[in-house]
Amino acid sequence: MRRDDGHGFRFQTSGKRERTSTCPNACAGRRCGPNFFVEWQRGRYTGGCHCECGSCAQRVDAGNAGHEDDPRAVTDHAFDWQRYVCLGSSAPGTVRSASGRTGIRGAETVARPAGAQGGGDTQALLDRIKTLEQRVSDLETSTVLSEPETRTKRIEVYVDKNGNEYDHPVEGAKKAVTYQRERVYRRQTINEKIEDALSEQEKRSVKLGVSGAFIPQFAIHTRGNRTVADGHAYELANADFFFTARAAQHTMFFADIVGISGTPPDGEVPTLTLLNSFTARLVRQNELNVREAWLRTDLFSQKLAISAGRLDLTNYFDRNAVANDETTQFLSDSLVNNPSLGLAVNGTGVVAVYDSKKSLTFKIGLQQSNPAAKNLSESIYSLAEVGYRANPLGLGQGNYRMWYRVNDTGPGHRTAFGFSADQRVSPTVTLFGRYGDAQPSPAYTGRDRFYSGGLQIHNQLVVNPGDAWSFGYTQSDLITGERERLGEGYYRFQLSEKLSLSLHLAHVIEERAGQPKLGFLIPGIRLQASF
Amino acid sequence: MLNSRLIMVVCGLVLAVFGVVASTPLPAADVKITDPASVVMIVNRDSNDIAFMDIKTHKIIGRTFLGNNVNPHMVMMSPDGRYVVTGGTRANKAYIIDTRTLELVKIIPVDIAPEHLAFSPDGRWYYQGNPEGDSISVIDMVSLTKIKTISGFVEPLNVTFTPDGSKAYVGNYGAHWVGVVDVRRHELLKKIQIAEVPSFSKLDPDRYYKDIHGINIAAITPDGRYLYAADGDLGVVGVIDAREDKVVKVIRVGKDPWRVYMGHDGKYAIIPNNGDETISIIDIRTNKVAATLEAGPNMTGVNYAAGKAFVISSTSGFVYVYDMGSLKPAGRLKIGTNIQLDTATTDTADQKIYLAESTTNSIVIIDGKTEAIERVTNVGLYPWGTHIMDSKDNYCH
């Protein structure tokens, strides 16, 4: 480390001989540091130091070093430029460094031309141009905004009763938050500036997500008396538009507008549960419906999230990692939601989720579940759930949830409870299971029961890395004697990040009191695109 | 004859005086750091300096200004504690600081946009990665000169030396391979492909043509036997046998894995998956994913302390905590609102974490055991990296 009070530089050889040169005023006092150079000039290698401005130089003639005819010697570091070091710089009042440089780079850029014997001046000029071109190229490669960056920063200050502001605690002064301009020496590339601007704009804008699905299904009669559904084809098209926007700090607005068109098999195949979950909790087809529209805010260090508006409570309760989403997992509604939830439509409500990000989560919610109700008291549907994350027996992550619901829609007061679990048993295999127990009506003393279970395998025995396949079985036993048993398997090809194609095969057996069993095989395809 | 003897005597005396002067230790006032392990180094991107904070008192005991618009990226101390080095990303230079005096002793031009760096275990070589120059600059720490620029990389981000110093592994973020460098000759020996790009990429060429998220680092096990390299686009971690330099296992993790953070005991490694906001914990003995746990957005680092893992979610203001015994979530620490968390280092006792928080110019000190938080303010403008000598969690973005 050297300090130099003058506007010049020193040129030192082998730490013994030192020569000093003073830089002319052209660059004095500016950012002008020493640079090492080596040139081929007049048939000899010359090296030395020069100011960054190039207006002054100290040279040493190395032509007699014995390597002038062997450019390889330069690149092999045998050339003795390493002994020479440029010292000092010229910016007064600052700490300056000793900037040493071997002759390698210089030698690379001004290597002796083959056969050059004379005309060294021309060659030196050409070499100089080449060097400058390289420097321009370097500048262009890292094109930067050189002016200081100005930005506004939130700062904490201390203000006394007289309005005097301090940046440190002072007796009698109150802590206050203010904003202040800050100027820093930060070079940003044009790319970085553009990215920052786009990112800032994105934060303030309403984000739109679009999802579309096309689902043809078929019904093949397999058991019992033939029905009109046998051999029929069905098709459903669905489009979802999601809007999200940041309304305030930790507060978000979300809306989901959905349009469905087509004929699902549920119109003709007499099943207890829907064979296509896309139509669940939707009242009308061939028009746009607001499925959800709510505001969410996070409180208490974002441990408590409260959402209010038009809700789909099944998005918060009875969740499952591998059997919860008709757009990427099973199509049958009994493998997407627990039928014991008994939620027929979405409605206005509120839900609170407490998640400490440890093992336990708590949720409570209520909503209006009858669009025809004249007051909220007639149609309150409420749910509560406790969730627990566990790694039982070192198997892997498991999620276990227990819920309880009360439904006041219609006459009486009906309750239900249920359980939903998913347990990873290996990095690629996840088991799931559900149980539900519901009181169908105050008139009945018995209860409807529901079971389901299955597994999902991803990234094993698959064609593409993102593919998954799964199998699930459900059984619904109603107090009225009706029973449904359904099995479904699917294979999902993840064709691209935004496009998936899945092949589904479901078989359902319906039992009615006093009637023969009915069986249907329901093959289907789902083409799903999400943006 | 007499004159010549007199001259010799005078010269001898002068030399002796010079010798005494040269061997005299620096005045106490010039020595700012006596124990290199007693400080936390802080990289201040926008004040263009390296600040040195005393680990015990949490006072800034000095800082080294590098120059306007230098914008240093990562700082590291040489294994012998003699020098502190950093790459000035917007100056295209490497900076060498004397640890004792905190004076800048050398500025060495390197390639374009130097960022991450590493020292060979013997401290002889300082490898400076230049992501925009697609090269590694080799700096000899004896002569403090750049002796070579190794080219042929594609956005080289991090360099990992083997414990014997014979090889260095370079993560290429702009490609899907790890470069193996022969440290004796400073030459790129081999390219190890972590996994093949899936065939269905034909349907989704954009995903692989633009903005590659390749390999950030090849993280080495404490015994030096294996290296683990996560590939962001492919969503996998490749396990490289360091003896044979070949991939022996490919482990699928979450979406867009950022990089591998090796646990201090070598039992587990954590990979933050920024694509799906989860972390994957890999069991090093079985080379399987032991757990996939929920985490936060934009994760930039993982630190291990007091038997827990602390995962930094840069834009949410939270640090997510995981119990490394049960492999379960253990809550999250709220560091602040509307802030940007950057990277952190852990002290050598594995007890305290020093987290850079750039928006408030602070260092947040987290006690690993009690999870108590202490904030040291005004450390410089835009602190975004920290470093402690011999820490096992010295990393960068």
Image: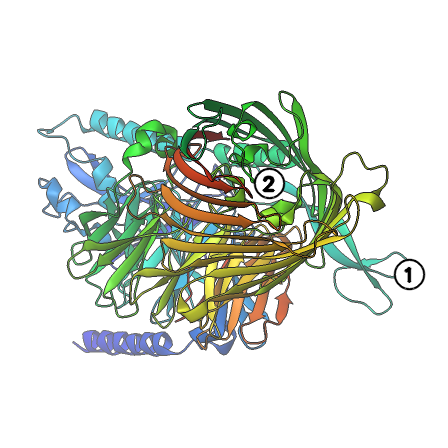
Asked if one can make out residue B285 in the rendered structure from this viewpoint, the answer is: yes
Q: Disc 2 on helix, strand or loop?
A: strand
* Residue A34 locus on image (x, y percent): 38, 46
**Amino acid, disc 2:** Glu
Q: Quadrant of the N terminus of chain A?
A: bottom left
A458 vs A507: above or below: below
Looking at the picture, how far across and down is residue A497, in whole percent?
42, 35
Q: Position of residue A209 (x, y in %)?
A: 57, 31
Horizontal side, residue B159 vs residue A389: left or right: left
Separation (CA) of disc 1 from disc 2: 34 Å
Q: Amino acid at mark 1?
A: Lys
* Disc 1: host chain: A
Query: In the image as oriented, which residue stretches furthest toward the right?
Result: A162
Instruction: Kindly identify the residue that appears in the image at 68 percent across and 30 percent down.
Output: A290
Residue B265 appears in which quarter of the rendering? bottom left
Q: Quadrant of residue A174?
A: bottom right
Label 1 sits on residue:
A161
Question: x, y (%) of residue B147?
Answer: 24, 52
Q: Is residue B380 or residue A447 the one in the foreground?
A: A447
Q: Which residue is mark 2?
A: A149
Residues A143 and B153: in front is: B153
Q: Which class describes the residues within 10 Å of circle 2: few (<14), some (14-19), or many (20+)?
A: some
The answer to which image quadrant residue B75 occupies is bottom left
Residue A21 in view in this figure: no
Vertical relation: B204 (above or below) A99: above
Q: Image check: A1 left or right of B12?
A: right
